[in-house]
Image (spheres, grey):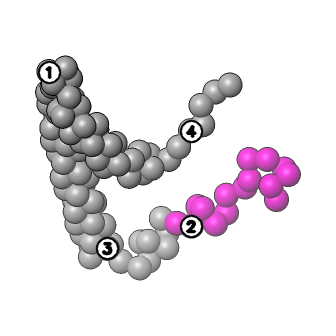
Amino acid sequence: MKPRRHPQGQFSQNIPELIQHLKGLYSGMEADPALTEPAKYIKRAVIELETARQAAYEVYQECLAANGRLRSDYSAHCGDQQREDAAEWLRDLQPASPLKQ
C-alpha cells in the first residue's frame, strides 16, 4: 500500500507540532541521568530544525512579496485590452477528452 499524498502546506503545519513534541521528549529525557547525553543530541536536532523552519518561512515570505510585486507591476503596465487578448485563447480551448464537453 502506498502512503497517502498530502498537499505541501500540510507539512508546514506539522513541523511546529513535531518541534513541540521533540522538545517535550528531550525535556523528559533530561530528567533521567542515563538519558541526558542522548537528550543533548535531540535538543541540538530540534534547534537545527527550528533554524531551518525559520529560514524556509523567511524565503516563503520573500517569494510571496516578490510575486505580489510582479503581479502589481504587470497590472500597472498591462492594459485591459492586453489582458483580454492574453486570455482569449483559453475561452476557445477545446477539451482534451470528448467526455469533458
Amino acid type indicated by mark 1: Glu
| 13, above or below 86, in the image | above
The span from disc 4 to disc 1 (Cα, nearest Å) is 36 Å
Among the two numbered marks 4 and 1 on one chain, the one whose residue lies closer to the N terminus: 4
The CA span between labels 3 and 2 is 17 Å
Can the viewer see residue 54? Answer: yes
Image location of residue 83, percent across then percent down: 44, 71
Instruction: Tell me the residue that label 1 is attached to.
Output: 37
Q: Is residue 51 left or right of residue 5?
A: left
Q: Of the residues tagged 1 and 3, which is closer to the observer?
A: 1
Q: Amino acid at mark 3?
A: Ser
Tag 4: amino acid: Arg
Q: Relative to 76, does residue 100 appear above or below in the rendering?
A: above
Q: Is residue 89 magenta?
A: yes
Residue that badge 2 annotates = 88
- On residue 5, the disc is 4
Q: Looking at numbered disc 2 in the image, what kind of residue is underneath it?
A: Glu
Q: Is residue 66 above or below residue 83?
A: above
| Label whose residue precedes the other's in the sequence (3 or 2) | 3
Q: Which residue is under mark 3?
A: 75
For label 2, the SS is helix
